[in-house]
Amino acid sequence: MKPQRVTWALEDHTRAKHEILRRYLQAWFPILALGGFPRMVFIDGFAGPGIYDDGSDGSPLIALKAFLDQATPIRAECHFHFIEKDEARADRLHGCIGTLFAARAKPRNLHVRVHSGEGFEQVYAEALRDHPRNAPVFALVDPFGWNGMPMTAMRDLMNRASGEVLVNFMFEEINRFLTHRDQPDNFDALFGCPDWRKVTALPPAQRKAGIRDLYAAQLVSMAGARFVRHFEMRNGRERTDYYLFFATKNQKGLKKMKEAMWSVDQRGGMAFSDATDPGQQVLFDGSDLTQLEGILARRFSGATADVDEIERFVVEETAFRETHYKGILKGMEARVPAAIQVEACREGRRRGTYPAGTRVRFA
Ligand SMILES: C[S@@+](CC[C@H](N)C(=O)[O-])C[C@H]1O[C@@H](n2cnc3c(N)ncnc32)[C@H](O)[C@@H]1O
């Protein structure tokens, strides 16, 4: 339900989203700084008032603090664009930013702009125009519903040297309104194609996957993402509240986003999982780690593979992280009969370790 007041209560599922944003940005700024980029751009497309009823930070403050709290100060010019259509919320956000910089010095290389009155769809292009094409852009797209976040905007944001988007896809509401007679134009814009109409005819279980997979496919084919993963947030009633879609062209970005996802606190009656691959719903609490053995066994059955190739597969095509697979290989090697055998490795390798250059054969 859309709140009418300027601020509203912070819910558990929003807390999880914030934790992911915070952890990702804590890694994003220094990675790009080390990469030598002289300028970085953060766009919060649906910024909100900057604060919740209980005083917790909203996404703009979380992003600013992720920048300010770096142990090694970031020297690049960092531009934050906060787009908030509602004037009263934008005023509150101004106030929150003012309070932050009354308490802490504002670095000269930090540039903050609040855009209000108009919406994300109207303003994002203007924000992008301020910056050269080679400046990395990270955009958070976090609406209440589905309007005003067209796939063309995702394409323009991704169409940068290092463009990434984190989109809150309000599945429950989108699903509910998909057949509403006033909405076809809005859904055409959201998906960037008319194909969502085919999904409406599917039975409920397939319809959910159909909606989600169409959006993911469009992020690749239309927006130009190389990697897209989606993360499902279920509420206490076991219903899907929303999907977070992360789209990037960069493997390092993908690794860091997964690291952020795997570190989210799962308490509070919600379940947060990676549902990108059919038949592989993976909870981020570690309880599903054993799934990875089956995934590796199926993918490499009877084949030999270099650890680099295994790692690339794990990072790019599964819900798991680069830190997960070596422990699984160790278990597979130790088993009797062994599920993998080391075919080549550097001299002096210890059993159960898989340094670069190790090749294994899967049973
Ligand atoms: C879900 S809230 C954002 C919460 C915020 N990202 C956070 O995590 O703290 C969505 C916000 O988008 C604003 N909004 C609604 N339509 C908009 C539009 N077309 N463009 C930009 N902001 C819009 C609403 O006023 C609301 O404050």
Image (spheres, rainbow, N blue to C red):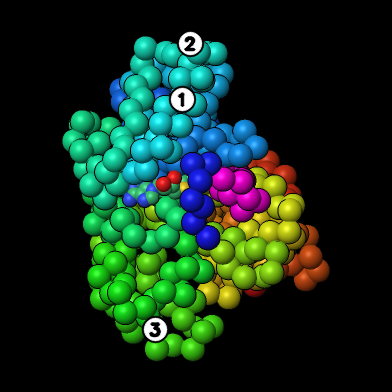
Residue 258 in view of the camera: yes
Q: Which tag, 3 or 1, sits closer to the chain's start?
A: 1
- Cα–Cα gap, marks 3 and 2: 52 Å
- In this rendering, is residue 298 above or below 38? below
Q: Amino acid at mark 3?
A: Thr
Task: Assess whether residue 10 is covered by the magenta stretch.
Answer: yes
Residue annotated with mark 3:
200
Image location (x, y in percent) of residue 53: 61, 39
In the image, which residues are magenta?
A: 8-21
Q: Residues within 10 Å of mark 3 (few under 14, many from 20)?
A: some
Q: Say which quadrant the C terminus sits in.
A: bottom right
**Could you say which is closer to the camera, residue 88 or residue 303?**
88
Label placed on residue 105 = 2
**Could you say which is closer to the camera, residue 22 or residue 160?**
22
Residue at left 51%, top 20%? 100
Displayed quadrant of residue 189: bottom left
